Amino acid sequence: MAREANRQEDGCRHRGIRGGREVSLPETPEQQSFYEAVGGHETFVRIVDGFYRGVADDPVLRPMYPEEDLEPAKERLLMFLEQYWGGPTTYSAQRGHPRLRMRHAPFHVNPDARDRWLAHMRAALDEVGLSPLHEETLWDYLSRAAHAMVNTFERTEIGPAAGTRADLPLTSEN
Ligand code: HEM
């Protein structure tokens, strides 16, 4: 009898209580990772591909990437994002702890670089067309992460932002 009561109590722990009513929690989608929910590897590949297409033509960002070929950098960002959102943990297996701020320290990440990085991400996400909720969740994260990566407020000495800003009414030359 006592054993029976215990068993029932145990059973209840696997259920959620909402608004006083007991409801069985569905197996999915609450157990599904964000990675799976947005379409897994294929979706992340599309996002990262789109992003690096933008980087390849960016006069400020492109020179920051050390390799001639952007492929290895693309692979690192892909592995990181997949891992972060609940996919395979290949990033940590190959690269160890992300320590992203530290890994970005050698690069000149000022607000201009950040905004360019985000603009390419924005274009990539628009191309992929996630559902509004997934989109907002991912964008919110990327935007906060990009702001946290800024490590200098000094101007970039290359690219359009380095010279006189035609979009600003007052410059030192006026
Ligand atoms: C804010 C503007 C940013 C700039 C200008 C920037 C630039 C760079 C550069 C130049 C590299 C080196 C490329 C390589 O060899 O892998 C790099 C690496 C990387 N970035 Fe960024 N990044 C920015 C923001 C971010 C954000 C927001 C994330 C994550 C959400 C991120 C994730 C990574 C990762 C995972 C790596 C590879 C790290 C490693 O394992 O070595 N970056 N980034």
Image (spheres, grey):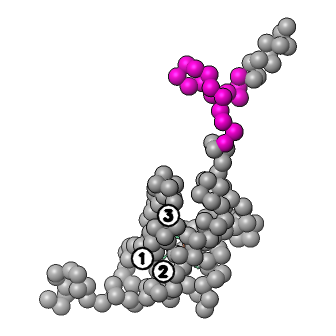
Q: Are marks 1 and 3 in contact (CB under 8 Å)?
A: no
Q: Read off the residue under disc 2.
A: 54
Pointer 3 local density, CA inside 10 Å: few below 14, some 14–19, many at least 20: few
Residue 129's spot in the image, x, y percent?
49, 63
Q: Quadrant of the C terminus?
A: bottom left
Please state which of the two labelled residues, at mark 1 or mark 2, is closer to the viewer: 2
Query: Mark 1 or mark 2: which comes first in sequence?
Result: 2
In this orientation, does residue 62 appear?
Answer: yes
Residue 105's spot in the image, x, y percent?
53, 75
Please state which of the two labelled residues, at mark 1 or mark 3, is closer to the viewer: 3
Q: Which of the numbered marks, if any, corresponds to residue 116?
A: 1
**Rendered view: 35 above or below 109:** above
Query: In the displayed structure, does residue 5 sit left or right of residue 29?
Result: right
Looking at the rendering, the stretch of residues picked out in magenta corresponds to 12-28
What residue is shown at x 52% (from left), y 22% (from top)?
A: 19
Which amino acid, mark 2?
Answer: Gly
What residue is shown at x 80% (from left), y 19% (from top)?
A: 7
Tell me how far mark 2 sits from mark 3, CA to CA: 17 Å
Q: Are marks 1 and 2 in contact (CB under 8 Å)?
A: no
Secondary element at image label 1: helix
Query: In the displayed structure, does residue 162 sit left or right of residue 9?
Result: left
Query: Mark 2 or mark 3: which comes first in sequence?
Result: 2
Q: Quadrant of residue 99?
A: bottom right
Secondary element at image label 2: helix
In this orientation, does residue 64 appear?
Answer: no
**Rendered view: 140 above or below 6:** below
Tell me how far mark 1 sits from mark 2, CA to CA: 9 Å
What residue is shown at x 70% (from left), y 26% (from top)?
A: 13
Which amino acid, mark 1?
Answer: Arg
Q: Which of the numbered marks, if any, corresponds to residue 129?
A: 3
